[in-house]
Image (cartoon, rainbow, N blue to C red):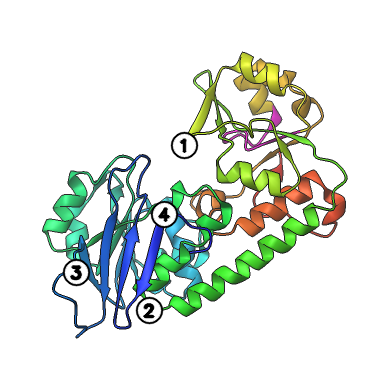
Amino acid sequence: MEYARGFSLIDYGNYKILEVRNPYPEADKSFTYLLAEEGAKIPARLHYDEKISIPVHKIVVTSTTHIPSLVSLGEINSLVGFPHLDFISSPQARQRIDAGKVKELGENEHLNTEILLSLRPDVLIGFTMKGGGKIYQNIEKAGIPVVFNGDWNEKNPLGKAEWIKFFGAFYQKDKEAAEIFNRIKNEYESAKKIAQKASNKPTVLAGGMFKDVWYLPTGDSWVAHTIADAGGDYLYKNTSGTGSLSRSIESVLDKAQHADYWISPSGFTRYKALKDASRHYTKFDAFQNKHIYTYGGVKGETGGLLFFELAPNRPDIVLKDLIHIFHPELLPDYKNTFYKPMQ
């Protein structure tokens, strides 16, 4: 992989070895999966956690971030089950859902195993915050292979996008996956070069409060990387660690009151709602100057946020959105996809 650090893929012809190194934060082990064609001769001493017959024809995925890869690879018709169907925004996936071809599986941590077993998928692509969990163990005991996906742990924006190669391997579409990723990479790099022409770097704040705690992306996060590549100066760029930063409103106000731009203010889409939630928000220059941009207003037909589904897979679009916000003169004809001005 060029950018992704969470998985590797070795092709031996009629079988492949997929290793997922970082399925969840601070994981103490990696997982090895054998992806084998029918009739493949497998070395006797080969060790692996699960065997999956490829190409797969029926799949269950558990995160909306998995959906765009299936769409891009032309394999959305293989999707047979998903937890929280309303979260999915993709028109292609919704068409299949509306036709009754994708079953509701409940909550990710409490999947409806009865429905899942009746679907008999070739593989379930799962994700976990802290380990395998009993639900996945029960699914494996029932004969359904479970493969962990750790795309959300990648720090590099292109590293997240490269996980399309992970999905391509299950459909024997490695070449197609590589071509799709290369197009995204080229778009990202081209936009990054445009941003380098900017004559200034506006300061940027991100995130918002939840129960009196302000959560912000770390300086190692893909969001921080994208802000930098868009020609922005993220005020928390020198922080590290996984997950989010937790700060008091007083701390954020002291550091970022005069930030030029504020992006991703939690789920808020209107200044009035922001003001009603906390008077502290009104003290920020970005609030007073109407320089707040949110992804909260771009939703699928059943309310799912498009940003959560598509943005990790299309960092080139996120980058162009931010360039257009920070340096509109560099992309004068561009129309933002995710980040819109707060109303």
User: Which of the two labelled residues, at mark 2 and mark 1, occupies the earlier sequence position?
Assistant: 2
Looking at the rendered structure, the secondary structure element under dot 4 is: loop
Look at label 1 and name its amino acid.
Answer: Thr
CA–CA distance between discs 4 and 3? Answer: 21 Å
Q: Which residue is mark 3?
A: 46
CA–CA distance between discs 3 and 2? Answer: 21 Å
Residue range (magenta) = 261-271
Looking at the rendered structure, the secondary structure element under dot 3 is: loop
Looking at the rendered structure, the secondary structure element under dot 1 is: loop
Q: Which residue is mark 2?
A: 172
CA–CA distance between discs 3 and 1? Answer: 33 Å
User: Which of the two labelled residues, at mark 1 and mark 4, occupies the earlier sequence position?
Assistant: 4
- Assess disc 4: are there few (<14), some (14-19) or many (≥20) residues with their C-alpha within 10 Å of its C-alpha: many
Q: Which residue is mark 4?
A: 6
Disc marking residue 242: 1
CA–CA distance between discs 2 and 4? Answer: 20 Å
Q: Nearer the viewer, mark 3 or mark 1?
A: 3
Q: Is residue 238 left or right of 244 when viewed as pictured? A: right
Q: Nearer the viewer, mark 4 or mark 3?
A: 3
244 above or below 16?
above
Q: Nearer the viewer, mark 2 or mark 4?
A: 4
User: Which of the two labelled residues, at mark 4 and mark 3, occupies the earlier sequence position?
Assistant: 4
- Assess disc 3: are there few (<14), some (14-19) or many (≥20) residues with their C-alpha within 10 Å of its C-alpha: few
Q: Residue at x 60, y 44 (%)?
A: 223
Image position, residue 291 (x, y; %): 77, 35
Of residues 77 and 101, the one nearer the viewer is 77
